[in-house]
Image (cartoon, helix red, strand yellow):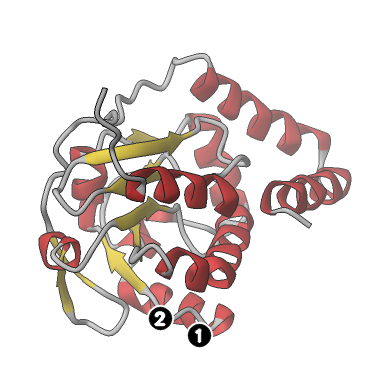
């Protein structure tokens, strides 16, 4: 099953089990995002990828430019371990990691959740790539994916016992829009997938196609 089909099946099941008013709040929050009423401006292909240093789930510092010195990077932002769609994405990306590596590409995940949550989800899914803690969504802001959570979603998360400020170690109700940035060895964003509907994520084959295009020789006219 593809990643997005798995996510769709999960939502269909969950929507039947939740109260109709809760489903309505979730859908209304997504609609606001899709309609552009919760603004954000992600970096586009051709932009220089902002460098950063963040700590991974083991407390080790990681610099983006150091990773790029070794090859292209698949940088992706996810909301948190509490998000079932993020769990599906992390699992599928781990399964595709060896295919990504054939193009010399590294996976790097970024989340506003504190490292203890990153470590827990890494152990749960046996992830062997870095999960970086983006305090206050600062790196997400530099990549143009940080948003203030719609009020309807804030209410739902609180009812589910997911207080973002506590999980993220901040006073903010902000999250990244789940987005994938494929960054070339030269530090330039080559391809992106940023979707306002957080139930849709970039499938591994799409990433592989972008990596293949990135490694293809340039033919002179």
In x, y percent, where is residue 38?
Answer: 41, 22
Which residue is painted at 41% across and 54% down in the image?
A: 164
User: Answer yes or no: do the residues labelled 2 and 1 have beta carbons within 8 Å?
Assistant: yes
Q: Residue 218, percent across and down?
A: 28, 37
Q: Position of residue 129 (x, y in %)?
A: 38, 75
- x and y percentages locating residue 87 in the rendered image: 58, 63
Disc 1 secondary structure class = helix
Q: Report which quarter residue 86 is drawn in.
A: bottom right
Residue at the spot of label 2: 119
Q: Which residue is located at x 83 percent, y 44 percent?
A: 12
- Among the 4 quarters of the image, the one containing residue 191: top left
Instruction: Check disc 1 and report the residue beneath it.
Output: 123
* Relative vertical location of residue 37 with respect to residue 219 in this rendering, above or below: above
Q: Residues within 10 Å of mark 2 (few under 14, many from 20)?
A: many
Q: Residue furthest front?
A: 221
The residue lying toward the viewer, choosing from 131 and 185, is 185
Q: Residue at (51%, 65%) from the top-left corner?
A: 81
Q: Nearer the viewer, residue 220 or 198?
A: 220
Q: Secondary structure at mark 2?
A: helix
Give the quarter of the figure containing the N terminus.
Answer: bottom right
């Amino acid at each position: 099953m593809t990643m997005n089909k798995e996510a769709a099946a999960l939502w269909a099941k969950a929507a039947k089990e939740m109260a109709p008013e809760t489903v309505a709040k979730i859908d209304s929050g997504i609609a606001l995002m899709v309609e552009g009423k919760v603004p954000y401006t992600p970096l586009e292909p051709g932009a220089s990828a902002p460098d950063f240093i963040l700590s991974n789930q083991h407390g080790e510092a990681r610099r983006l430019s150091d990773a790029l010195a070794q090859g292209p990077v698949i940088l992706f932002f996810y909301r948190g371990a509490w998000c079932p769609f993020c769990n599906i994405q992390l699992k599928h990306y781990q399964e595709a990691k060896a295919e990504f590596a054939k193009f010399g590409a590294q996976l790097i995940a970024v989340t506003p959740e504190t490292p203890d949550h990153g470590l827990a989800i890494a152990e749960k899914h046996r992830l062997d790539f870095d999960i970086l803690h983006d305090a206050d969504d600062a790196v997400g802001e530099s990549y143009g994916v940080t948003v203030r959570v719609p009020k309807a979603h804030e209410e739902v998360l609180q009812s589910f016992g997911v207080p973002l400020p506590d999980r993220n170690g901040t006073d903010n109700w902000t999250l990244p829009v789940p987005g994938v940035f494929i960054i070339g060895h030269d530090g330039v964003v080559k391809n992106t997938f940023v979707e306002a509907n957080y139930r849709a994520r970039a499938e591994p084959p799409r990433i592989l196609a972008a990596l293949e295009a990135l490694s293809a020789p340039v033919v002179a006219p």
